[in-house]
Amino acid sequence: MRQMKERWQAGESPMPEGVIFVEELGEDEAAEEDGGRGLQERTTKVWGIVVQGKGVGCGPVCYLLKTSRVGAGPGSGMSVFSTHFCLVRVKSFRETAQSQLKNSWLLQSQWLQ
């Protein structure tokens, strides 16, 4: 990141219209998801995403992204996988990522009734 910033300041490359930062959230968030079973290969991961636009009126916006890899397991003789994802806007930094993801599904199911 520092090298990119230096190139922008030196005028070697144009400033971007926006920047997106992505980071996988810690093991404690994921352990809550797998129920403490300690799976060796996690198929569900939670990511923190910050989007920063260019300009005065473009403050950063934070999102949570949950990805789940699913598919036919090794016992079936098939190696076909797909990734399901859920993206929600962060409402509070005091509430855990898992709680916010779970609550977004609960709120969505109320709309469908």
Image (cartoon, rainbow, N blue to C red):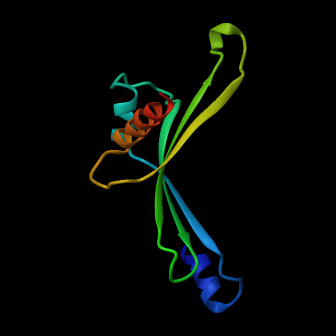
Q: Position of residue 4 (x, y in %)?
A: 61, 76
Q: Is residue 46 above or below residue 54?
A: above
Q: Residue 3's image quarter?
A: bottom right
Q: On the picture, is 15 further left or further right than 102?
A: right
Q: Residue furthest front?
A: 113
Left or right: residue 54 versus residue 111 is right
Taking the spot 52% from the left edge, 75% from the top edge, the residue there is 58
Q: In front: 16, or 39? A: 16
Question: Residue 66's x, y, as percent?
Answer: 50, 40
| Residue furthest out toward the left | 94
Specify whether residue 62 is in view. Answer: yes
User: In which quadrant will I find the N terminus?
Assistant: bottom right
User: Who's the residue at 40% across and 27% down the image?
Assistant: 34
- Name which residue lies at 46% across and 26% down: 40
Q: How many marks?
A: 0
Looking at the image, residue 32 sits to the left or right of residue 56; the answer is left
Residue 97 in the image, given as x and y percentages of width and height: 37, 45
Task: Tell me which residue sits at (47%, 69%) in the image.
Answer: 60
Q: Quadrant of residue 93?
A: bottom left
State whether residue 85 is above or below residue 19.
above
Q: Name the foreground residue: 31 vs 65.
A: 65
The percent coordinates of residue 95 (x first, y second) are 29, 48
Q: Residue 27: in sight, yes or no? A: no
Q: Is residue 9 left or right of residue 94?
A: right
Q: 83 above or below 54?
A: above
Q: Is residue 86 above or below residue 12?
A: above
